[in-house]
Amino acid sequence: MSVTKDLFGKLADGREVSIYTIRTDRLCARVTDLGAVLVSLYTPDRNGEMKDICLGYDDVENYLDNPGCLGATVGPNANRIAGASFVIGGEEYHIPANEGANNLHSDKMFYKRLFNAHSDGDSVTFVLGLPDGDAGFPGNRIFSITYTLTDEDLRIDYHAKSDRKTVINLTNHSYFNLAGEDSGSIADHVMKLNCSSFTKIVKGAIPTGEIAPVKGTALDFTEAKPIGRDVDSEEEQMTLVGGYDHNYVIDGYTGKGELLLAGEVCDPASGRVMQVLTTVPGMQVYTANFLNDKHGKGGRTYGPRSGLALETQFFPDNVHHDNFPSSIFGADTEYDSTTIYRFPACR
C-alpha cells in the first residue's frame, strides 16, 4: 500500500491544490484536498483490466464549477431542506435557497473549499473548519473526512464536532459506472437494495414525512433487477424527478453505529460488483436524470443515466419531520459515520 502526493493545480489566489493517489495490490483511488473530492477509483474487471469507474474532471477549474457534484463530499448538510430554513432550540436559521424555495446540498459550497490534508499509510484525511454562521448554519465546526483503501474496500470515515447544536449530514456524491466512466448508460447495471421502504416525495423532491413500502412500485429493488427496467416508469413518484432520485430506508437500522449492507450493484458486461455498507439510516439513489456535463474526463460528455450516485445519508429534510432520524448534533453529541464501497471478486 502506498500514498503519493502530486500537484493538481492552483486556485485563483495562488494556493496549490494537491491530489493524493492511494494504491493497493488491487485498487487505486485518487482524492484531492479541494473539497475532499473523490476524483478517480480504478478497479479490475473479470479479466483483470483496470478502469476508472468514477465520473469526474481532469482539472481544478472544472471541480470549482462542478454543477452535478461529481465525486464531491457534500456538507454540512447533504440533500434538501424545505424552505431553506430550520429551527433548533426555538431559533430559526436561514440558509441559501438554491433550488426554488429550498436548499440543496448546502448551496454546494462545502466541496469548493481547500481542506487541510495529511496522509498515513493507506489513508488520507481532509480537515476543514467553518465558523459560526457560515452559509447560515450555526456553530463553530470542524469536519474530518478520511479515505482508506484496502484490496477490497474504499472506506470513508466522517467526523464532525460543533460548539452549538447544528445540522450535520455528510455524504459522498460520486457517480459510479462499473463499466468505466467512459462507457455511457448504467441502465444495464443490476441493483439489489436491502431497503423495503423509502421516503415519499412531492414536487421539488421534498419528503412528505411518509415512509412508504417499495413493494409493488417501480422503486422496488428488494429483488435484483436492471436499473433501466423501471427507470422511465410513469408512476408519479418517478415522474416527479425524472427517474430514481429517492431516499431509501436501510433495513435494520438501529442508530447504534453498526455497518449495514445497503445494497449492491453489478455490471454484467465487466463483472464488476460494488456493495455499499454504511452506519447511517438512508441512501439516496440517483440515476443522473438531469446530468448534462460537457467537461468530463478526456473531454467526454456525461449525460443522463451515465452514472449512478449512491449517497448514504440521514433522510432529506429530517429537520422538519420528527419521525425521521435526526441529524442535529452539538457540543455533547459529535457526528461520526462510516461508508464503505466494497468491490468483491467479479462475477
Image (cartoon, helix red, strand yellow):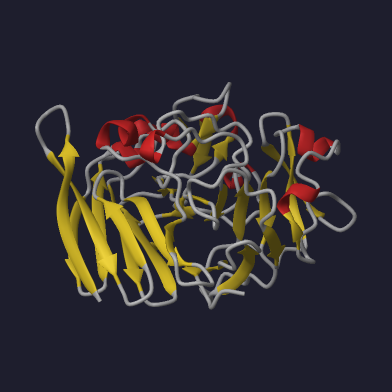
Query: Residue at coordinates 38% horizontally, 74% vertically from top-left?
Result: 26
Q: Nearer the viewer, residue 270 or 28?
A: 270
Residue 143 visible in rendering: no
Taking the image as shown, residue 10 lies to the left or right of residue 282, namely left
Q: Nearer the viewer, residue 143 or 22?
A: 22
Residue 93 placement (x, y as % from top left): 45, 32
Spot the residue most to the top: 100
Spot the residue most to the right: 216
Query: Residue at coordinates 58% horizontally, 22% vertically from top-left?
Result: 101
Taking the image as shown, residue 39 lies to the left or right of residue 245, namely left
**Quarter in which the N terminus is drawn:** bottom left
Quarter of the figure with residue 117: bottom left
Query: Residue at coordinates 78% horizontally, 33% vertically from top-left?
Result: 239
Quarter of the figure with residue 118: bottom left
**Quarter in which the C terminus is drawn:** bottom right
Residue 289 placement (x, y as % from top left): 64, 36
Q: Is residue 289 above or below residue 276?
A: above
Q: Nearer the viewer, residue 280 or 69?
A: 69
Residue 214 placement (x, y as % from top left): 82, 56
